[in-house]
Amino acid sequence: MPMAKLEIQDVSKTFDGTSVLDHLTFQLKDKEFVSILGPSGSGKSTLFHVIGGLLSPDSGDIVMDGSSITGQRGKISYMPQSPSLLPWRTVLENVLLGSEIQGKTDREQALRMIEKSGLSGYEHTYPEQLSGGMKQRVSFIRSLLSPQPVICLDEPFSALDEFTRHDMQKWLLSIWEEHQRSILFITHNIEEALFLSDRIIVLSDRPAHVQKEFTVPFSRPRDPSLVLTEPFLTCKKQIYKEIRKLS
Amino acid sequence: MKTYASKGWRPTAVLLLLLVIWESSSRFLAIQEWLFPAPTTIIREGINGWSQYAPHLLSTIQLTLIGFAIGTLIGLAVAVILHLIPSLREAVYPLLILSQNIPIIVLAPLLVLWFGFGVLPKLIIIILVCFFPITVAAMDGFRQTNREYIHYMKMAGATRSQLFRKLEWPHAMPSIFSGLKISATYSVMGAVISEWLGASEGIGVYMTLASSSFRTDRVFVAIFLIMILSLSFFFIITQVEKRMIRYQTEGERDANG
């Protein structure tokens, strides 16, 4: 078994007397795709802010490759809920932003990635002219091109319509299967979590702690028709029941 | 051009109508030339008097440009410093606002007293009227940076200086340009007023000379020259803005096409 890439060790966070994260502990292995599933308002975003170093936990540690990164910024690559592409930068310049902040850019690689993502011809257009799905692709390429080994995605497809969302999930998997990185994926969509991940961590309602962990039994590469098969639906039901217990 | 032809004819027609009313009323009501000259008289003076006012015009343009350039630099520097040092901003910003309640013009006699009739007090006046709109516009631009972008930049590990250079500065560009446009027109006004106080050359001087010798047509010529100067200044900045802020114009072009 590969060693843990990222460890969340007993992390707690309180805001104005309300506990938001309550002794949260889980791991992300190297090249693993883990989804964090939880009701909205369960502190998923707070968790990301703590991992990203924007917030310091009251207690506990964030450990990457065996050393603590608690409170340090720029240790993870990040894809926010809204694409957050800078409007004055072209697609190519936007894609390079994450690596630029870390000090090293690779134009050639960026151009290759843009082409592979089906965005060739758009290298020098401005984000304003892209559709919602295309913007999210650019945003994901940006996080892939950032040098950090762990990527955190914060409900990246929640603002997209159903059709685009399915396309994007398929696309994300195909890109990820090629450039395996460790991914932590926040979502509130059970089907999305099941279809994409190796493991699902269900968070409880506030204060958030790990309610249950599921290992997703499906092999890769996964086909979109998977979501209609009997085993998939069984898993979905199981997770659904777990979440129902919370309310 | 198409949009100009379809929309621009209305104001053009109104302008022409006003000119016709002006011209005919001064002819038929036999208004004294020195009191209110007809447009044709003004235009004639504007064409024939070129050699007389050209040096004045040149001197004003020079003064305006130098003052505007220095004012812009100071304005931007103040904005950047105040933005990057929040405690300083809190201390100084209210005073800055307060200082703008002093009409700069009333400081002019004081400046003349301190610095004489040379170029320095004139430049100071232009700088004083110019820098404030730029400072306020730039600071607003910096502060209104989209929270989402800031959030991304911080999560990606951007340092304070990267945050400023890669995000806040480019984000404030459109805002800075609107400040520049306001300052550009202010700086022409500042230049003319500073010339009234005493100078050997400039449109302001030409104007005072004309009015004291009852050459009202020349006063009007001066007024139109100032208008043209302001407008062309404004226009140049708009053009520079279009070149520098590509992403907006491209979007507009797309929307029109």
Image (cartoon, coloured by chain):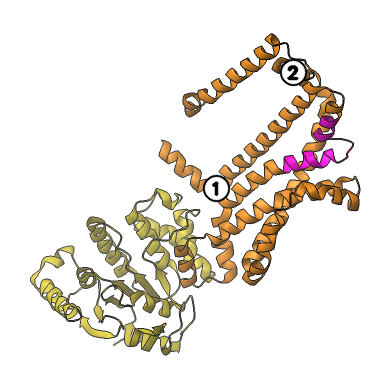
Of residues A140 and B17, the one nearer the viewer is B17
- Magenta residues: mostly which secondary structure? helix
Of residues A117 and B238, the one nearer the viewer is B238
The answer to whether residue B197 is magenta is yes
Chain assignment, label 2: B
The image quadrant where one finds the C terminus of chain B is top left
Classify A75 as above or below B25: below
Q: Earlier in the sequence, mark 2 or mark 1?
A: 2
| Chain yellow in the figure, letter | A
Classify A205 as above or below B67: below
Residue A11 position, x and y percent, is 38, 87
Q: Is residue A86 left or right of residue A237?
A: right
Instruction: Point out the stretch of residues depicted in magenta.
Output: B187-208
Residue A72 position, x and y percent, is 49, 81
Q: Residue at x 34, y 81 (%)?
A: A30
- Locate residue B65: give its quadrant: top right
SS at mark 1 in the image: loop
Q: Residue at x 46, y 79 (%)?
A: A53
Which numbered disc, 2 or 1, marks the residue closer to the eye?
2
Q: Amino acid at mark 1?
A: Ile
- Residue bearing the label numbered 1: B245
Report if residue A120 is visible in the image: yes
Of residues A119 and B38, the one nearer the viewer is B38
Marks 2, 1 in one chain? yes
| Chain orange in the figure, letter | B
- Residue bearing the label numbered 2: B37
The answer to whether residue B50 is magenta is no
SS at mark 2 in the image: loop
